[in-house]
Image (cartoon, grey):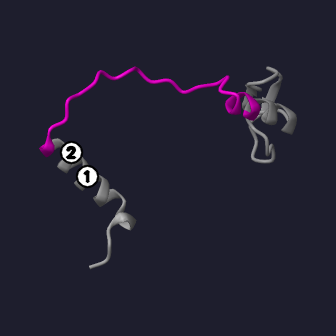
Amino acid sequence: MTSLVSCPTCKNQVAWLPENEYRPFCSKRCQLIDLGEWADEGHKISQPIQENIDLNEEMLDALEEQFLQQNKFFVEPE
């Protein structure tokens, strides 16, 4: 059974099939309209505002170590 979804831009029903290269959009036009909304900051992914946290040297060192472990390309070769 084919799933139908609503196009986020025009709300037309779209079949959710691998052949539909624009899914979840119904067309390239609707896809580009949505992209333009993101570019104009009409769409945003929001997150709650975090309170200011006072960081001490130990916390900064731990954050730096974690960052370097996850991003090894920033570490100079030995």
Q: Secondary structure at mark 1?
A: helix
Q: How many marks?
A: 2
Which quarter of the figure has residue 23? top right
Residue 59: where, in percent of width, then height? 17, 42
**Residue 44 on the magenta span:** yes
Q: Secondary structure at mark 2?
A: helix
Tell which of 77 and 27 is nearer to you.
77
Say which amino acid is labelled 2.
Answer: Leu
Residue highlighted by disc 1: 64
Residue 3 appears left or right of 78: right
27 in relation to 60, above or below = above
Residue 54: where, in percent of width, then height? 20, 30
Question: Which label was assigned to residue 31?
Answer: none
Q: Write down the region rendered in magenta.
A: 35-58
Residue sitting at 83 percent across and 22 percent down? 12
Residue 41 appears left or right of 47: right
59 in relation to 70, above or below = above
Tell which of 3 and 46 is nearer to you.
46
Question: Which label was assigned to residue 60?
Answer: 2
Residue 64: where, in percent of width, then height? 25, 52
Q: Residues within 10 Å of mark 2 (few under 14, many from 20)?
A: few
Query: Which is the main secondary structure of the residues drawn in magenta?
Result: loop
Query: Is the Cβ of the residue at disc 1 closer than 8 Å to that at disc 2?
Result: yes
Residue sitting at 79 percent across and 46 percent down? 21
Tell which of 29 and 68 is nearer to you.
68
Residue farthest bottom in this picture: 78
